[in-house]
Amino acid sequence: MALRAGQGHLLNLFRGSNTDLKSQLAKDGWPMLPYTHGQGVYTLMPDTIHPDSPLANQKVREATEYALDKEAICKVSGNGLWNPVWQSTSSGTAYYNPSIVARKFDLAKAKSLLAEAGYTAAKPLSFTLYALQSDGVLSQQLQAMWKDAGINVTISSMDQPTWSKYMGDPNGWSNGYYISALPTQPFAPASFQRHWGTPATVYAGAARPKELTDAFNTLLATTDMSKIGPLAQQVVKISYDMAVIIPVFEHEADWNIDSKHLKDPGLNVVNYWDSANAWLAK
């Protein structure tokens, strides 16, 4: 209301929520401001640190991805503001890997992999989905899609403090997926540190396989900037091949702006505000 009344020039609503409102504001003349290097990627972080977790099985993780119609998720829950993704970055980054062949929606393939993993109608796969309360619509859509594949999912809806606590606790989420958004930044090591860094400070319930850790450490040790992109693409490829996280969509831009008056707000990179470039027209 303040934005529409001219009492403010920049609106930030938490990513992944209020997409209906954001979309309407954009249509009414308060466009969304995207980051130059792509938005964050909403991902499902599996509990792989516990050996008895069903998601410790790669075939199960792949099955849960094949069961998701990401295009439908973006259309319904994202109100057209989201873009489906199949790797842990968006196409707007230098570390997007074009060689990856997406695990697109295939219900038959999902059921086949579940059967190979020992899950049937008589013994269905069951796990918990840990999500923010603001992701309620998304959570229910994921739950319904998994149900179609014969997977029973319980939603654990959390407030922000509880959700944040779970992120860094290796025993926080178990036997399930944790929904979170990975930042997309122009410098790959800064973006990857959150989810592949060791020892784990965030997403502590997700294991760091040695092959992935070694590739990431090689990337961190690289001082030749010309090699950063290819090495980062290798990290992305390994994470995809092992299905250690399940990317779902590139979320919407963070900001709706008063473009008539706010000029160059200086918000071109995630988590960085170039305030010296921000100015208002009369």
Image (cartoon, grey):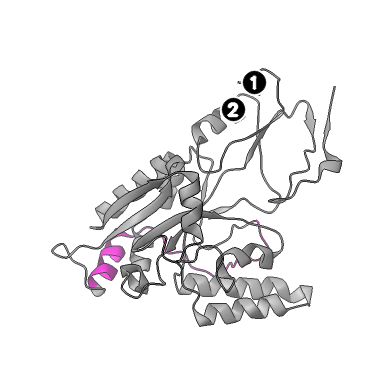
Mark sitting earlier along the chain (1/2)? 1
| Left or right side of 76 for 124 | left
Q: CA distance from mark 1 to mark 2?
A: 9 Å
On whether residue 72 falls in the magenta region, the answer is no
- Name the kind of residue labelled 1 in the image: Arg
Q: Position of residue 30 (x, y in %)?
A: 65, 28
Which residue bears the numbered disc 2?
25
Quadrant of the drawing holding the C terminus: top right
- What span is colored magenta in the figure? 92-115
The one nearer the camera, 121 or 27, is 121
275 w.r.t. 91: above or below = above
**Residue displayed at 51% across by 61% down:** 168
Give the number of the mark in front: 1 or 2. Answer: 1
- Bin the neighbour count of mark 1 within 10 Å (Cα to Cα): few under 14, some 14-19, many 20 and up: few
Where does residue 97 sit, x and y in percent of width and height? Answer: 59, 68
| Outermost top residue | 5
**Most prominent secondary structure in the magenta stretch?**
loop
221 or 81, which lies in front?
221
Q: Which mark is residue 4?
A: 1
**Mark 2 Cα within 10 Å, few/some/many (few <14, many 20+)?**
some
Residue 113 location, x and y as percent? Answer: 29, 70
Tell me the element at label 1: loop
Location of residue 213 by image quarter: bottom right
